[in-house]
Image: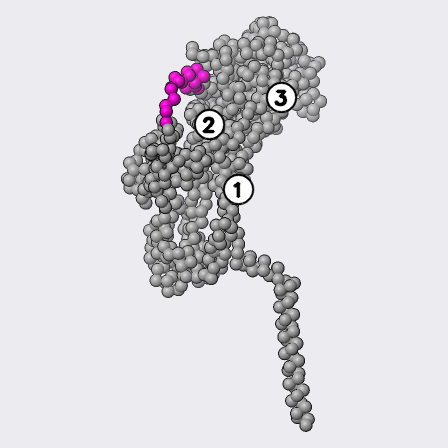
């Protein structure tokens, strides 16, 4: 009996345990479903689903005529998932030798044995590295197509593990032209110049693609309806004129080399609008070459020297203390102020001369004598006059890096007994070349000071989204009477004074030369190699009806030649001559009757972009080219016909009829270096289409607007 009860007890115990276990399982299920369900479902999605960011195409930066200054070209990193689901040991071992040979032959940097060893070891020991870097460098699109045909790589991503990762590379088709102003985007995403100022416009908006992990451990797109398309960046149209930019840079480079100067800058600006048409900044390297290493025109504040004498002249005329015909004695070219001896460049001085002549000859003695006579007891009034002309205010231009102007005020810590005299001739003050140019431009613009502008408009797919207008800084920096006298004096500098070497018979230049010693910090103006100078010329042309203003600044010219008229003046004149000979302001184009055209003439190029343009402009088109990227276009009957344009590996593509951006993409992708002449559409290419490519060879593109 005891045995039977023991058996029943044990059976009951087991039964109870099963019931308790069942209840525990049921409780856990309910807990998971009701309490942790949402969290676990979300966790499951993160494991099997993920959002992939789709980077947008960065917008282009263009010159005023549409020519490319900066654009993005796609390159690719060659990576490999050595643990791809379909990449079995049998498949890998059977093809690794062939793949290693192909990689070695293509890149030429390692032997086939090294490639094989590295890939084998990575597969064996780097099991968590699903994106092994195979290639030593990024490749272009056509190279990618060739690599994708290699053994193993030619299989699907799941079977062969081939993973090309696109990386957009920013290029400048015109190399160093205006490079610092155009700017750049650093690897960390930081941007400077126009690239930085308008990054919010250029970068566009990233898209999102929902991907799901498959059984083969690959990520595939779930549904196109679940995808948020990226929004490409807009194009920034600058005010720069490539032709004038080229002239400015070449003229500056020539004079810097001639005078063995340290660095220099040039800015050419349209008087009425403030649009900067050219800006060049060059620095001499240790090997004697010159590069755009810093934007001196915007970022370097320095004592301007004699070009600042204009501020004193305006103050004197505005206060009614002098007229330009008054006489002043230059006292044999010397004047002592405390421990400072002020001298004129002409030994013995100029004797008794008019105020106009004092400015034309750039007499230091005359200017310091006048500022002492009329403002010695009115120092604050004089500085207030300078402030009223906005000389103490930054321009607040769109491009970052502007050095703040420095004009001290009586009572400041650094104000001294000779500050008034030194400031009158352009010392103990600091301004950038662009700030000085803006001041002179106001004189050319009938007294109206406008903000320098580097960007004309913003465009999307060729359509203008925003146009920037001229901003007025000061509607009138002086009276009309003073303006008339000042313009007469500035014209006299070139006709009779220190810049007579700039005179010509075709048009008149007005401006002012400047020669200043360069301060060397605590050591004063004399460094280890003696005294260095800054030579400059700033002015406008044509003097009677100013269209353009320009400043040239050359820092530390050597070979014992440092005066502004000799060092900086020729650069100004070369630029002015080019503008004069090519500008429609003086030589209006012959008007032509509009020609009737039912359909516009279209360029050849990248098919998706052409289709986008046709759609936005409502131009009918007939797409005869399926599954291709590059096409030609021609006028059909009521439509634009789109036909395939064949692109063959290792052969020079035919880029005639394309825009510069597409032409550069195709030619650089096959390994050619592009040299551009002219603007518009490609009309001729120096290497015949179909010719076998020799990597690194130059191909010259002749562009035409016709």
Is tag 1's residue or tag 2's residue first in the polypeptide sequence? 2
Q: Nearer the viewer, mark 1 or mark 3?
A: 1
Q: Give the residue displayed 68% in from the left and 90% down from the top.
A: 5
- The residue beneath circle 3 is 390
Is 610 left, or right, of 533 in this rendering? Answer: left
Please give the residue where the numbered disc 2 appears in the rendered image: 64
**What is the crowding at mark 2: few (fewer than 14 residues within 10 Å), some, or many (at least 20)?**
some
Residue sitting at 50 percent across and 13 percent down?
Answer: 545
Quarter the C terminus occupies: top left
Residue 205's tag is 1
Q: Nearer the viewer, mark 2 or mark 3?
A: 2
What is the C-alpha distance between the residues marked 1 and 3? 39 Å
Look at the image and say whether residue 595 sits in the magenta stretch.
yes
Q: Which residues are magenta?
A: 579-597
* Residue at (39, 64) in percent of width and height: 89
> Tags 1 and 3 in contact by the CB under 8 Å rule?
no
Q: Residue furthest front?
A: 638
Of the numbered discs in the image, which one, if any, rests on residue 36? none
Seen in the picture, residue 697 relative to 135 is either above or below; the reply is above
Q: Main secondary structure of the magenta part?
A: loop
Q: Position of residue 265 (x, y in %)?
A: 50, 26
Q: Which type of secondary structure does the marked residue at label 2 adopt?
A: loop
Badge 1 density bin: few <14, some 14–19, many ≥20, Cα 10 Å = some
Residue 675, image quadrant? top left
Q: Name which of mark 1 and mark 3 comes first in the sequence.
A: 1
Viewer-proximal residue among 344 and 91? 91
Tell me if residue 5 comes above or below residue 298 in the rendering.
below
Could you give the CA–CA distance between mark 1 and mark 2, rounded to whole angstroms?
Answer: 25 Å
Q: Nearer the viewer, mark 1 or mark 2?
A: 1
């Amino acid at each position: 009996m005891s045995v039977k009860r023991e058996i029943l007890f044990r059976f009951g115990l087991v039964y109870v345990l099963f019931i308790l276990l069942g209840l525990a399982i049921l409780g856990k299920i309910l807990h998971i479903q009701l309490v942790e369900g949402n969290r676990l479902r979300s966790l499951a999605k993160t494991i099997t689903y993920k959002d992939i960011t789709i980077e947008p195409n960065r917008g282009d930066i263009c010159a005023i005529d549409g020519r490319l200054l900066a654009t993005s070209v796609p390159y690719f990193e060659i990576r490999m998932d050595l643990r791809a689901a379909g990449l079995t040991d049998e498949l890998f071992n059977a093809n690794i030798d062939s793949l290693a040979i192909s990689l070695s032959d293509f890149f030429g940097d390692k032997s086939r044995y090294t490639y094989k060893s590295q890939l084998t070891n990575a597969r064996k020991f780097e099991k968590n590295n699903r994106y092994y870097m195979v290639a030593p460098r990024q490749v272009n699109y056509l190279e990618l197509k060739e690599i994708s045909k290699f053994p193993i790589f030619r299989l699907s991503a799941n079977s062969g593990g081939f993973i090309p990762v696109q990386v957009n590379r920013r290029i400048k088709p015109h190399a160093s032209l205006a490079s610092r102003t155009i700017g750049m985007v650093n690897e960390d995403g930081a941007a400077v110049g126009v690239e930085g100022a308008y990054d919010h416009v250029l970068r566009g908006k990233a898209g999102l693609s929902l991907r799901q992990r498959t059984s083969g451990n690959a990520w595939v797109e779930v549904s196109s309806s679940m995808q948020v398309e990226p929004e490409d960046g807009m194009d920034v149209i600058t005010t720069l004129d490539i032709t004038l930019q080229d002239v400015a840079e070449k003229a500056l480079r020539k004079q810097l080399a001639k005078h063995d100067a340290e660095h220099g800058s040039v800015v050419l600006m349209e008087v009425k609008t403030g649009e900067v048409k050219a800006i060049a900044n060059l620095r001499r390297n240790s090997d004697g070459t010159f590069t755009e290493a810093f934007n001196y025109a915007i970022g370097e504040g320095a004592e301007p020297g004699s070009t600042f004498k204009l501020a004193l002249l305006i103050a004197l005329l505005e206060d009614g203390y002098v007229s330009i015909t008054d006489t002043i004695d230059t006292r044999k070219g010397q004047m002592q102020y405390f421990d400072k001896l002020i001298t004129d460049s002409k030994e013995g001085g100029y004797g008794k001369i008019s105020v106009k002549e004092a400015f034309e000859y750039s007499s230091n003695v005359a200017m310091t004598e006048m500022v002492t006579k009329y403002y010695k007891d009115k120092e604050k009034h004089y500085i207030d006059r300078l402030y009223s002309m906005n000389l103490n205010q930054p321009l607040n231009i769109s491009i970052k890096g502007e050095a703040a102007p420095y004009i001290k005020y009586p009572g400041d810590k650094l104000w001294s007994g000779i500050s008034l005299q030194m400031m009158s001739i352009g010392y103990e003050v600091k301004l950038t070349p662009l700030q000085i140019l803006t001041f002179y431009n106001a004189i050319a613009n009938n007294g109206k000071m406008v903000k320098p502008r580097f960007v004309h408009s913003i465009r999307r797919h060729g359509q203008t989204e925003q146009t920037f207008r001229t901003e007025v800084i000061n509607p009138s920096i002086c009276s009309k009477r003073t303006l008339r006298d000042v313009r007469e004096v500035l014209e006299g500098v070139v006709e009779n004074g220190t810049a007579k070497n700039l005179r010509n018979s075709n048009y008149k230049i007005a401006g002012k030369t400047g020669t200043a010693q360069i301060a060397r910090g605590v050591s004063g103006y004399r460094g280890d190699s003696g005294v260095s100078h800054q030579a400059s010329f700033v002015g406008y042309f044509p003097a009677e009806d100013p269209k353009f203003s320009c400043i040239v600044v050359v820092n530390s010219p050597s070979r014992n030649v440092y005066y502004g008229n000799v060092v900086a003046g020729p650069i100004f004149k070369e630029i002015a001559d080019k503008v004069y000979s090519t500008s429609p302001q003086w030589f209006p184009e012959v008007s032509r009757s509009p020609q009737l055209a039912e359909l516009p003439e279209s360029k050849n190029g990248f098919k998706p972009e052409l289709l986008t343009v046709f759609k936005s402009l409502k131009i009918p088109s007939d797409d005869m080219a399926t599954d291709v990227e590059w096409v030609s276009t021609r006028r059909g009957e009521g439509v634009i016909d789109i036909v395939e344009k064949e692109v063959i590996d290792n052969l020079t593509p035919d880029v005639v009829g394309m825009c510069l951006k597409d032409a550069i993409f195709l030619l650089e992708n096959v390994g050619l270096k592009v040299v551009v002449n002219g603007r518009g559409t490609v009309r001729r290419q120096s290497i015949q289409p179909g010719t076998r490519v020799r990597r690194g060879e130059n191909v010259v593109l002749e562009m035409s607007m016709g």
